[in-house]
Amino acid sequence: MQLLECLVRRVATNNPHPGLGNDRENGCPMNEPRKKSPGRPPLLGERMIQTAIWITPDQHKWLAQQPGTMAEIVRRLIDAEMQKG
């Protein structure tokens, strides 16, 4: 059954609420479970963890003057320190 037909039937029967009635039994696609999408692909090929840091105004000013985004700069600095080991 087409989606438009389901909507028309709901309006005609005064049943605008999804899940009420027997739409699924009648083949109405409106109550079918949504398929999960894979979502946005991860940045840099791996899953990132969002975090927040507290920095001084001087640190913020320095970060803002560097090329790239602040997140890229912080990741680069952390990676450099990790390489030192």
Image (spheres, rainbow, N blue to C red):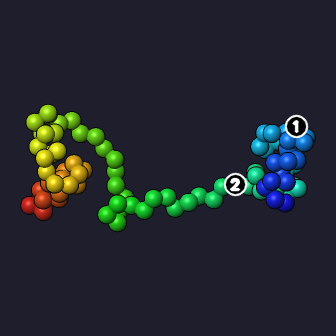
State the image quarter where residue 26 is shown: bottom right
Please name the residue shown 87% across and 37% down the image: 14
Foreground of the two, 61 or 25? 61
Q: Is residue 55 above or below residue 31?
A: above
Residue 81 in view in this figure: yes
Label 1 or label 2, whichever lies nearer to me, is 1
Q: Is residue 29 left or right of residue 21?
A: left
Mark 1 element type: loop
User: Which corner quadrant holds the N terminus?
Assistant: bottom right
- Residue extending farthest to the top is 57
Q: Which residue is mark 1?
A: 14
Mark 2 element type: loop
**Going from the N terminus, do you reach mark 1 or mark 2 first?**
1
User: Which corner quadrant holds the C terminus?
Assistant: bottom left
- Number of labelled discs? 2
State the image quarter where residue 40 is shown: bottom left
Across and down, in percent, residue 53 comes to 23, 39
Q: Is residue 73 above or below residue 12?
A: below
Please name the residue shown 85% across and 54% down the image: 5
Residue 24 in view in this figure: no
Across and down, in percent, residue 17 comes to 78, 39
Q: Is residue 15 above or below residue 70?
A: above
Q: Which residue is mark 2?
A: 33
Q: Estimate the spatial distance between the alpha carbons at disc 1 and disc 2, rounded to whole Å.
A: 23 Å
Foreground of the two, 7 or 59? 7
Across and down, in percent, residue 41 comes to 42, 62
Q: Amino acid at mark 2?
A: Pro
